[in-house]
Image (spheres, grey):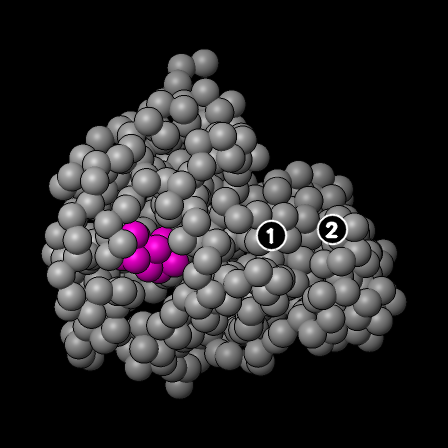
């Protein structure tokens, strides 16, 4: 099989590459273009000179992208990477990292095949400081190279394993915490949990039984996506359906769920365009609503989309891609301030840094030792579509959840 690898693409060119693949969509309207806070450790101070290193030629900081742009998860990754590219395009428009260094994205399209990722990532790592995006399919294939080359990588989603691995920069609760929080919120309900063989699906499946016991949920039935889901859900008499499946299975799951059920899906992963009037769709989300003033970070986020991707409709996946870059950006700012962009130094900086300010787009992260497993807030939103809904996606906030007993679950799963 041919290796598909696209290198040397700047942030602006990459945005055009991604946006060209997306359907024309609703123009985002922002009431005010005030920039608000951006992650920066410089505060106007003059940074010292920075020596050249892998991925940094003295002028340009190159970051790697390992994604599926033309394979089965392409819709998801193209949306998330639009957010990634808009983020760095905005950083570049403001002078770059440290006010001096432009960021360019080097792209590896593995087409949904982890073997392509495994074969191609060594060449990519010869060109970049860090991997600013690694999609779920490639995580396992890429990880050994991250360890060998002392490279940090941004994970757009999280499992307990990824959350606890210092090579991965995460910003959302591990999916196991989501399962526990949902079971704790409705322990007396009958739950059906549908999973596939994806990394997230396996994490949900492996944690569900323990999470149910800790949460006191006595009626939890595990199902695989290949089953006759309609018959299985009907036989289990489930009221609540939690689906953690890859994009290619989303249509089947939504079509198979019997009427009058409540179906939970992660907003940043699911195709929210799939709808049925006889089901209540509920999305587990980790950020604020799509109002300009719903958080400090929403104004610069929406302004960045207006500048760099004006035709993108409100989409949690785009926002997730944007938010995923904040943590790496803060590390790069500090590295420039310290005059050292070497991978080993960047890794050490991440290990030593205790606080990451997520500007209200996600819960602030405490990265200090012993604090890796604190679950972050998650929102549960209903698909309402009502005219009075303040969320541009037509979603209403139902409640905020936190997996209070997550430490116990983490100890059991990590053993």
Residue 95 visible at all: yes
* Numbered circle sitting on residue 414: 2
The Cα atoms of the two marked residues, 1 and 2, are separated by: 10 Å
Above or below — where is 119 with respect to 159?
Answer: above
Query: Mark 1 or mark 2: which comes first in sequence?
Result: 1
Q: Quadrant of residue 37?
A: bottom left
- What's drawn in magenta, residue-wise? 325-335
Horizontal arrangement in the rendering, residue 88 relative to residue 315 (left or right): left
Q: Picture coordinates of residue 261 (x, y %)?
A: 69, 67
Numbered disc 1: secondary structure = loop
Q: Which element type, helix, strand or loop, lies under badge 2?
A: helix
Where is residue 35, by image quadrant?
bottom left
| In magenta segment, residue 126 | no
Q: Is residue 314 left or right of residue 46?
A: right
Residue pictured at 34% horizontal, 47% vertical: 81
- Pointer 1: residues within 10 angstroms few (<14), some, or many (20+)? some
Q: Which residue is at the far top?
A: 1
Depth check: give the residue in front, 17 or 210. Answer: 210
How far across and how far down the image is residue 83, in percent?
31, 54
Q: Nearer the viewer, residue 259 or 14?
A: 14
Dots 1, 2 in contact, CB < 8 A:
yes
Q: Is residue 17 above or below residue 183?
A: above
Q: Position of residue 118 (x, y in %)?
A: 49, 25
Residue 329, magenta (yes or no): yes
Residue 164 - label: 1
Q: Residue at x 56, y 44 (%)?
A: 246
């Amino acid at each position: 099989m041919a290796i598909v690898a696209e290198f040397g693409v700047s942030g602006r060119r990459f945005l055009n590459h991604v946006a060209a693949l997306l359907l024309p969509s609703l123009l985002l309207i922002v009431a005010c273009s005030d920039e608000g806070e951006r992650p920066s450790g410089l505060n106007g101070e003059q940074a010292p000179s920075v020596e050249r290193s892998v991925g940094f030629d003295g002028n340009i900081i190159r970051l790697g992208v390992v994604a599926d742009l033309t394979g089965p998860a392409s819709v998801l990754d193209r949306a998330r990477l639009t957010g990634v590219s808009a983020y760095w395009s905005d950083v570049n428009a403001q002078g770059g990292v440290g006010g001096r260094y432009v960021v360019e994205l080097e792209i590896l399209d593995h087409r949904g095949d982890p073997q392509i990722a495994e074969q191609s990532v060594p060449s990519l790592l010869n060109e970049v400081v860090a991997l600013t995006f690694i999609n779920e399919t490639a995580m396992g294939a890429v990880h050994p190279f991250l360890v060998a080359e002392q490279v940090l990588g941004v994970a757009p989603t999280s499992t307990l394993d990824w959350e606890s691995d210092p090579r991965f920069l995460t910003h959302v609760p591990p999916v196991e915490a989501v399962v526990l929080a949902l079971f704790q919120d409705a322990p007396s309900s009958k739950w059906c949990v549908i999973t596939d063989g994806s990394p997230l699906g396996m994490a949900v499946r492996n944690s569900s039984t323990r999470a149910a016991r800790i949460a006191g949920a006595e009626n939890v039935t595990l199902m695989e996506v290949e089953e006759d889901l309609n018959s299985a859900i009907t036989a289990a008499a489930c009221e609540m359906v939690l689906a953690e499946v890859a994009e290619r299975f989303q249509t089947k799951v939504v079509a198979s769920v019997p009427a009058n059920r409540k179906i939970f899906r992660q907003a940043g992963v699911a195709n929210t365009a799939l709808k049925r009037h006889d089901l209540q769709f509920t999305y587990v989300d980790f950020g604020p609503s799509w109002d300009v003033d719903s958080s400090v970070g929403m104004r610069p986020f929406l302004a960045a989309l207006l500048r760099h991707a004006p035709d993108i409709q409100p989409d949690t996946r785009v926002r997730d891609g944007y938010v995923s870059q904040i943590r790496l950006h803060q590390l790069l700012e500090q590295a420039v301030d310290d005059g050292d962009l070497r991978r080993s130094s960047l890794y050490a900086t991440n290990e030593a840094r205790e606080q990451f300010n997520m500007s209200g787009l996600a819960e602030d992260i405490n990265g200090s030792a012993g604090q890796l497993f604190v679950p972050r807030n998650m929102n549960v939103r209903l698909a309402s579509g009502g005219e009075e809904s303040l969320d541009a996606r037509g979603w209403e906030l139902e409640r905020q959840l936190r997996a209070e007993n997550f430490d116990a679950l983490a100890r059991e799963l990590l053993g």
